[in-house]
């Protein structure tokens, strides 16, 4: 890293993770309750574990951060160069995360490194735009694809990215509804897409032509294949996510990232369709098929968060008309995929070793489990 | 119980068997990729010696094996036929299982059976160097061995990702005096073009073939050599099946079903073609089953049609079961079975119903290979293991029915260079692929017409 001085935005959500240790399943709005139950702030220590690794390249890194426990203290403790560009309120909150990120962007950064959970990721992603973001895991919920597996891994990813050794991929920012989660229900919702650096877990494949370890290239391959088989006169319901979005993009349409669109013979039939729209469509169309991809770090292909593709919609379309797509990278990171359409019988029907399209004319077999059985 | 059935060196066949003489349906001719007219011998002379072109076009049933070639075959031929007694016992099957092991060749596989005569005929016609491609490295090793034995030079274009991930294949080629170059390379116009467009590409077999062909076509002293698909390759490989027939005579037995792995077609046709006359003339009730990976199931899910032999569309257009020359099979560990089509001679016989095909998943193949290794000792190459799995299934069926069938496995080579693949299996990291035939069919049917 001879002459590089990378500019990194850095912030800590100081209360992240506090709820988990005292059984609160998330800390959003409950920091005081967590503290009252004896929870200790953990995020700062997790962040420092990452920063200490980064300190070995101290001369090549410059940080922009928020005041005190939101970043300043940890950076100082680790001997890193920084400038405080946001004065955090006390106690700090979601608004501080957003304001700090805006200030980072105004200073021109290469990477936005944050320490927190899904709630923090949502706030960061809402501002980051095209700047890659990377999460140091510290939260109770970490379903988004921007988190490294450990603080140390986050440091390695950050350094690899700065050295130009790693690629970025577009991944989903998801969060669960904490109130329902506390009642024992897991509802994953997709909130945004963000760029993040990643290290491919795949072994180098032999003999592949024009192969690439680049996950985005695989999304393009899947989209190309889909754009070819989607010209059979059926109406195709495209679920949420960045992989399905790429299909619409290839067909010259802008996909509703967080919602459901319908395409037939290369033309947009419905945008951001609701369940009722889909049921009406199914009644009127000769043939309807659904294309879904796993969302978030747990691999839900059907979460109750995607309310539009309901159990009723699935039943009427028929599970045989469900086409699952995913990059091989994502599949390699997941032990199995999860189905949770709100109907236990249907979830069971969907489970087993199923075909997942992973490239141009290429598919893998992957285990799908009914979320209720996990 | 007798375990090994061995032939004496003098029993190495003196002639190869050419199945083209016995085909119920004549072979459709290969076409020129530019004109789509039948290929003439002159079209091939730029990269092949005349003797091999004559063999490629021949319908003579028997073709003499030159004495110089037989002399080299003596280094490892005849290969042993084993009775898999320990495996039978482990399976508690009344069936009899045999396997013929080609891993005893210096290169560790059946590939030298054709590499040696190809090097010989080129040497006889004054060629000084052979250029070829290799993916996983078995063919490159075999041709390096054969060329050094006849005093020829050899240039092997090895797919870059394999070059980096399988260093010991490259080491073996160096020992045998060949030059092994990662492809794409800066040696050829095509390689330079690919590198300019994609400096970090891991390469592909298609690119490597194009480089080797260009090298051969642009140097007077250099020819090209291919290790599968072509008629003369299958002719040379018939030495396996001819030996096998004598060995079954020794064992006083005859197969009911034969299993062999199949990529582009070299070992499997070589082993089973000499049995085709038995089936046609003597009406023997013999099943011959080509075993291919589910990731690249050309015989089981491909279309029987004319298609390009290579990715770039520069090789001859041949009638075969194909997944399309633009299909890039996923990176399974049986790298030698990743070809979009199959040998025309084999496809013709599959189409006529004389030969069957089956497709297998990686994990079940490695599971069977492990069971085999733990009983028979030999660690099979991942390619070869594709024949073991259905043979075990057949033996287990016999256990249920009480049948004493004779089951044959063609064991093409050892897996000593493939232990990383066994590690991946044991670590639970092998992916099972399934070719999405219905979606592909749907996409082909509805493509916009030009």
Image (tube, rainbow, N blue to C red):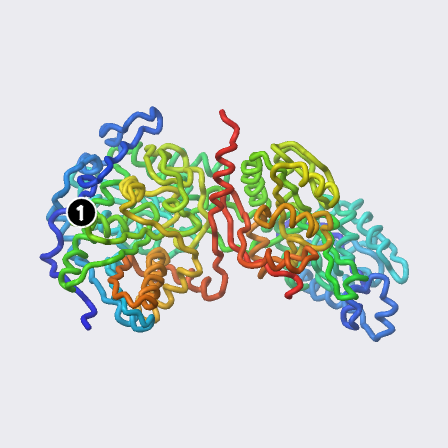
Left or right: where A83 falls relative to B118:
right
Q: How many marks are shown on the rendered structure?
A: 1
Q: Is residue A166 above or below residue A12?
A: above
Q: Position of residue A238 (x, y in %)?
A: 65, 43
Q: Is residue B281 left or right of residue B218?
A: left
Left or right for A369, reference B285: right
Q: Quadrant of the C terminus of chain A?
A: bottom right
Whether B381 is drawn above or below A228: the answer is below
Q: Is residue B363 visible?
A: yes
Is residue A236 depicted above or below A64 in this figure? above
Give me the residue at 20% from left, 52% from top: B284
Decide: few, some or many residues near mark 1? Use Cα within 10 Å; few <14, some 14-19, many ≥20. some
Where in the figure is residue A260, as x and y percent of width and height?
A: 70, 43
At 38% across and 64% down in the image, what residue appears? B368
Residue B145 at x, y = what percent? 25, 52
* Residue farthest right in this picture: A90
Secondary structure category for the residue under label 1: helix
User: Can residue A59 be seen from the camera position used here?
Assistant: no
Q: Point out the residue furthest to the left here.
A: B10
Out of A245 and A316, give the one closest to the viewer.
Answer: A316
The quadrant holding residue A76 is bottom right
Q: Nearer the viewer, residue B429 or A281?
A: A281
Q: Is residue B204 above or below residue B403?
A: above
The quadrant holding residue B328 is top left
Q: On what subunit does the disc labeled 1 rest?
A: B
Q: Which residue does the image show at 34% across and 66% down from the upper left?
A: B396
The quarter of the displayed image where residue A180 is located: bottom right
Residue identifier under label 1: B277
Q: Position of residue A175 (x, y in %)?
A: 74, 56
């Amino acid at each position: 890293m001879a002459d590089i001085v990378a500019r990194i935005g850095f912030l800590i959500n100081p209360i992240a993770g506090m709820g988990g240790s005292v059984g609160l399943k998330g800390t959003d709005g409950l920091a005081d309750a967590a503290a009252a139950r004896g929870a200790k702030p953990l995020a700062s220590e997790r962040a420092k574990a990452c920063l200490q690794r980064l300190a070995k390249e101290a001369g090549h890194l410059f940080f922009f951060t928020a005041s005190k426990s939101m970043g300043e203290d940890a950076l100082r403790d680790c001997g890193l160069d920084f400038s405080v560009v946001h004065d955090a309120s006390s106690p700090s909150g979601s608004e501080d995360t957003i304001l700090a990120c805006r200030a980072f962007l105004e200073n021109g950064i290469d990477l936005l490194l944050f320490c927190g959970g899904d709630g923090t990721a949502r706030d960061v992603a809402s501002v980051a735009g095209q700047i890659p973001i990377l999460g140091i895991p510290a939260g109770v919920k970490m379903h988004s694809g921007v988190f490294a597996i450990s603080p140390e891994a986050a440091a390695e990813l950050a350094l690899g990215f700065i050295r130009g050794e790693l690629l970025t991929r577009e991944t989903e920012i998801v969060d669960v509804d904490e109130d329902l989660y506390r009642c024992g229900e897991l509802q994953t919702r997709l909130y945004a897409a963000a760029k993040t650096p990643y290290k491919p877990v795949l072994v180098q494949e032999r003999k592949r032509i024009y192969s690439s370890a680049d996950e985005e290239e695989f999304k393009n391959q899947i989209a190309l294949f889909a754009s070819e088989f989607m010209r059979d006169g059926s109406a195709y319901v495209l679920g949420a996510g960045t992989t399905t979005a790429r299909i619409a993009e290839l067909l010259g349409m802008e996909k509703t990232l967080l919602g459901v669109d319908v395409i037939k013979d290369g033309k947009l039939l419905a945008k951001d369709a609701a369940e009722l729209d889909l049921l009406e469509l199914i009644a009127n169309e000769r043939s309807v098929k659904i294309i879904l991809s796993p969302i978030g770090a747990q691999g839900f292909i059907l979460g109750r968060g995607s309310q539009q593709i309901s159990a009723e919609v699935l039943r009427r379309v028929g599970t045989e008309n469900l086409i699952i797509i995913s990059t091989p990278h994502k599949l390699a990171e997941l032990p199995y995929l999860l189905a949770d359409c709100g109907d236990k019988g249907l979830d069971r029907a969907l489970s087993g070793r199923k075909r997942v399209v992973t490239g141009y004319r290429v598919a893998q077999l992957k285990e799908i489990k009914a979320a209720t059985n996990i | 119980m007798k375990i090994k059935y061995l032939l004496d060196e003098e029993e190495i066949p003196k002639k190869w068997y050419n199945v083209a003489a016995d085909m119920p349906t004549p072979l459709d001719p290969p076409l020129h990729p530019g004109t789509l007219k039948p290929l003439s011998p002159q079209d091939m002379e730029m990269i092949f010696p005349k003797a091999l072109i004559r063999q490629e076009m021949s319908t003579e049933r028997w073709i003499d094996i030159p004495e110089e070639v037989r002399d080299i075959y003596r280094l490892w031929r005849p290969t042993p036929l084993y009775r898999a007694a320990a495996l039978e016992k482990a399976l508690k099957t009344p069936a009899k299982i045999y396997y013929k092991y080609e891993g005893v060749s210096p290169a560790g596989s059946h590939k030298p059976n054709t590499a040696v005569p190809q090097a010989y005929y080129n040497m006889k016609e004054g060629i000084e160097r052979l250029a070829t491609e290799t993916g996983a490295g078995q063919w490159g090793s075999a041709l390096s061995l054969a060329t050094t034995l006849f005093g020829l030079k050899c240039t092997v274009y090895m797919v870059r990702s394999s070059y980096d991930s399988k260093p010991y294949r490259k080491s073996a080629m160096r020992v045998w005096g060949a030059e092994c170059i990662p492809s794409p390379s800066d040696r050829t116009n095509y390689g330079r073009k690919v590198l300019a467009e994609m400096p970090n590409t891991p390469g592909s077999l298609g690119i490597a073939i194009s480089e080797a062909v260009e090298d051969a076509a642009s140097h007077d002293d250099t020819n090209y050599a291919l290790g599968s698909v072509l008629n003369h390759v299958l002719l040379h490989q018939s030495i396996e099946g001819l030996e096998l027939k004598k060995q079954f005579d020794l064992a006083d037995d005859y197969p009911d079903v034969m299993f062999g792995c199949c990529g582009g077609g070299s070992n499997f046709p070589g082993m089973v073609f000499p049995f085709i006359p038995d089936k046609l003339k003597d009406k023997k009730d013999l099943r011959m089953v080509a075993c291919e990976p589910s990731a690249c199931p050309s015989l089981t899910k491909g279309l029987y049609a004319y298609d390009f032999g290579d990715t770039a569309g520069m090789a001859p257009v041949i009638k075969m079961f194909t997944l399309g020359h633009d299909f890039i099979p996923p990176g399974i560990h049986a790298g030698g079975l990743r070809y979009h089509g199959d040998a025309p001679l084999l496809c013709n016989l599959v189409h006529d119903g004389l030969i069957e095909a089956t497709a297998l998943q990686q994990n079940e193949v490695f599971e069977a290979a492990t069971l085999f290794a733990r009983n028979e000792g030999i660690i099979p190459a991942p390619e070869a293991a594709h024949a073991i799995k259905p043979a075990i299934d057949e033996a287990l069926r016999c256990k249920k029915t009480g049948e004493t069938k004779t089951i044959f496995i063609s064991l093409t080579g050892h897996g000593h260079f493939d232990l990383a693949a066994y590690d991946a299996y044991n670590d639970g990291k092998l992916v099972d692929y399934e070719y999405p035939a219905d979606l592909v069919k749907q996409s082909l049917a509805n493509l916009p017409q030009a």
